[in-house]
Amino acid sequence: MFGKARASRHIPCRGAPEVEARGGRLLSVTGVAMDITTRKEAEAVRHRLAKGERLRALGEMASGIAKPYRITDLRQVADHVAGALAKR
């Protein structure tokens, strides 16, 4: 669904039909719809922050590995990290 600015919204819906016992005719549908866009947006922000934190930690780890060996080539750092992770 779209809001005023034609932005996408997250609105899950659930419903259940009420049917006539004898003929099976549909009498009504009862349900609920809830806008969870704000929750979805907050989850996306948390996900981006977590990804940034993981990248920062990886950079610190690579820097810590590179300093004792005076490694300046990024490929060498990546090889050392991969080797250390493989030994786990």
Image (cartoon, helix red, strand yellow):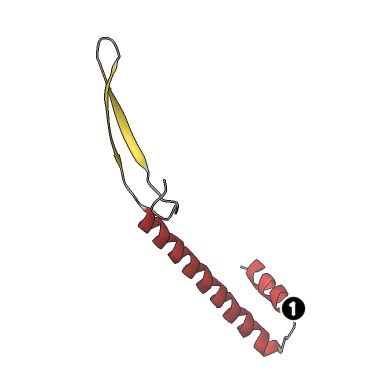
Q: Is residue 55 left or right of residue 15?
A: right
Quadrant where the image shows the N terminus: top left
Residue 19 x, y percent position in the rendering: 27, 19
Q: Choose between 63 and 37: the one closer to the eye.
A: 37
Residue 40 x, y percent position in the rendering: 41, 56
Quadrant where the image shows the C terminus: bottom right
Per the image, label 1 sits on a secondary structure element best described as helix
Crowding at mark 1 (Cα within 10 Å: few <14, some 14-19, many 20+) = some
Q: Is residue 32 left or right of residue 77?
A: left
Residue 6 x, y percent position in the rendering: 44, 52
Q: Residue at x 47, y 63 (%)?
A: 47
Amino acid carrying label 1: it is Gln
Q: Quadrant of residue 69?
A: bottom right
Residue 37 x, y percent position in the rendering: 38, 54
Q: Residue at x 52, y 68 (%)?
A: 51
Q: Is residue 67 left or right of residue 37?
A: right
Q: Residue at x 49, y 66 (%)?
A: 48
